[in-house]
Image (cartoon, coloured by chain):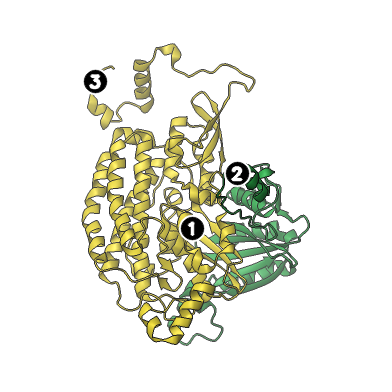
Amino acid sequence: MGVIENVSRWILGREAPEEELEREHLERLQPKDQLMPTWEEGEEGGKMVLSMGPQHPSTHGVLRLELEMEGERVLKITPDVGYLHTGIEKTFETLRYDQGTALTPRIDYLSPMNNTWCFIMAVEKLLEITPPPRAEYVRVILGELTRINSHLVWLATHALDIGAMSVFLYCFREREMILDIYEMVSGARMMDSYYRAGGLAWDIPPGFIEAVQAILDILPARIDEYESLLTRNPIWMERTQNVGAISAEKALALSATGPALRATGVPWDLRKTMPYSVYEAFDFEIPVGSRGDVYDRYLVRMEEMRQSLRIIEQGIRVIPRGPFRIDNHKIAPPPKEEIYLSMEALIHHFKLWTEGFRVPPGEAYAAIESPRGELGFYVVSDGSAKPCRVHVRGPSFINLQLIGPMSEGGLVADLVAVIASLDPVLGEVDR
Amino acid sequence: MAETAGNRYEEPTSEVAAASAVADQPDPTTLDKLTTHFGKKVLGTSTRLGEATAIVDAKALVEVMTWLRDEGKFVLLSDLTAHDCHGQEPRFWVIYQLTNIETPERLRIKVGLPEKKPSVESMVPLWPGANFLEREVYDLMGIEFKNHPNLTRIMMPTEWEGHPLRKDYPVVYEPVQFTHNAAEIRARKPLAEK
C-alpha cells in the first residue's frame, strides 16, 4: 500500500482533473502495460457473456441479468425476471375482495401497507364509498411510515452493496421501531392486511401516537447520522456521482416513476400532482434531482424520508376522532358488541365472512405513490364478490427497464450501484 | 372524493362542488377532442367513476396513440394490460393508461380483440417503456404485439404451454400428500408424471 500524499486533495479538492487522479491511482496499483483489462479474442470477438444472478447478493432478490461484457465494461444488459412469479393476479380472481387484502402485502413485501392501500382504493372507487376521516389519516401516517421503512431497507442494502457495512446495521436498527408499530396495529410485522375496504381492520391501539412520536423524536438525528456517513464521503461520491445517469425525456419514455424519475428533475409525485386520500391537507415538499445519477436518487430518497416525517408529525396531531370504518355493514363488519345484541348484526357478520361483499360491475384504476413509484391497481368487477381481473402496475417491474440505458457502457461494478439505486423488489417485479 | 363527484350526473349544487369535480376529473375536452379528430375510429367514450375511457378501433390504434402522445401531451404510458371476457365478443381487451403530467390528467384507451389470433400493434416505437408490459401481456394472456422488438415470455419459462391469465386456463390444485408410497403419490398426482 502506498502512502497518499496530500490527503485533503483526495477528500475535498478537485484541483487535479479527475482523469489525472485516476491514472495516478491506477499506476500505483499496476504496472503500466496492464492498465487496460484485456480479453482474448474469442468467437464472439472478445466479448464475454456473464450471468449475474439470480443468486447474486446485490441483485436484491432473484433478479438475473445477462451481461455482455468486454473486459470490465458492460455492453448490453438483458434482465431476466420471473423467478418469483407466483401468479398473484390469477390468485386474485379466485379470492373474494376481502380476502384479497391478504395477498396484497406479499406483492411488495418491503412496503406492505402501500399495496393494500392501493388495492383498497380501487375497490372503494368501484363501491363508491369514502372511508371516514380517521381511517384516512391513519392510512396516511402508516403509509408514510411504510415509505420510511422501505427507504431504510433501500439505504441499508445500497450502502452494503457499495461496501458500507455499518449503515446497514444502523438502518435495520431504526426499521425495527417501524416494524414494532406494524405489530402494534395489525399483529403482524410484515404481512399486515390492516387496511380494509371502508376503513381499517380495527382502531389504532392505545399508545400508538406515543410510539410514532418516539420515532419522530429519534429519526431526524439518525437520518443526519446516515448522511454524515455517506453524503460527503469521497468513496461514496466517487461510486455514485455521474454513475447511471439518465435524462428526463428518456426516463419518461420508459414510463419511469418515483425517485428514479424525480432524480432527473421531473417533479412528478402523485401525492402532490394527483392527490389521493387526504394528502391535500398536508404540507410537504417534493425533492427533485438534476442529473439523474445514482447520487441524485440517493439524495432524493434521503430528503423524502425527512418529508415523510413532516407528514407524520402533522398527521398524529390531528387524527380526527370518530369511526375507523364505514357504517355500511354490507361492506364493513359490524362491531363485535353489536353481534351479541342485534340479530341484523349477526346476520351481516355471518354473510360478510361467508360470502363477502358484492361490488358493482365496472372498472377502476387507482394509483398511489409507493416508495418505488406509481403503484397502480386496475380492477375489473363483474358484479360478484370476486374480482374479474386485477392487474398490478408494479413500479419495480417497469423501472427495471431503466437498467439498460443507465449502465450500458459502464463498468460492472457501477451496475451494482445502479441496481441498488433503482431499489427493485422482486416480489413486485414478478408478482 | 373524486369517485363520487365523477359519477354525479345532476348539476353540482354549489360552486365548490363544481370546482372540485373539474379539478378531480380528467379534462372532459380530451375525449371530445379525440372524437372530433378521429370520428368513427373512436368507437365509444365514457367517463365513469371519474375516469375517462375511450374505445378505439384496433386498426387506428397507432394513429390515435401517436396523436395523443404528440398533440395530447400524454407523455407517460402508465400502464398496459389486458382483460379476458371469455364467452363474449370481442373476447380480449387491451387497456392502456395514459398520463399527461402537465395538466395532470389520465386517459384510458381500450382496444377490443377477437378470440382467434388476437393481435395488436406494439406501442414500443412510441413508448419504449411498453416493452416489458407487452411481453407480460403476451406471456400471460396470449396477445400478439406486432413490431415488438423481442416478443418472448417474461414471467413463465420459455417452454411453457398456454397463457395462465386466460379465463379458460384452470387454476390447478394438488392436495398435499401425506404418504411416502411412490405408487400412491403417482396415482394421485397425474400432473407430476408429465
Q: CA distance from mark 1 to mark 2?
A: 47 Å
Chain of the residue displaying label 2: B
Q: Position of residue A204 (x, y in %)?
A: 31, 69
The residue most toward the right is: B116
- Identity, as a three-letter code, of the amino acid under mark 1: Leu
Pick the front one: B88 or A307: B88
Q: Position of residue A245 (x, y in %)?
A: 45, 40
Kindly state the secondary structure of the residue where label 1 is placed: strand
Which residue position is annotated with label 1? A375
Callouts 3 and 1 close, C-beta under 8 Å: no
- Identity, as a three-letter code, of the amino acid under mark 3: Glu
Chain of the residue displaying label 1: A
Which residue position is annotated with label 2? B181
The answer to which quarter of the image holds residue A230 is: top left
Pick the front one: B71 or A61: A61
Name the side, left or right, on which B167 lies relative to A83.
Answer: right
Chain of the residue displaying label 3: A
In primary-sequence order, the first of circles 3 and 1 is 3
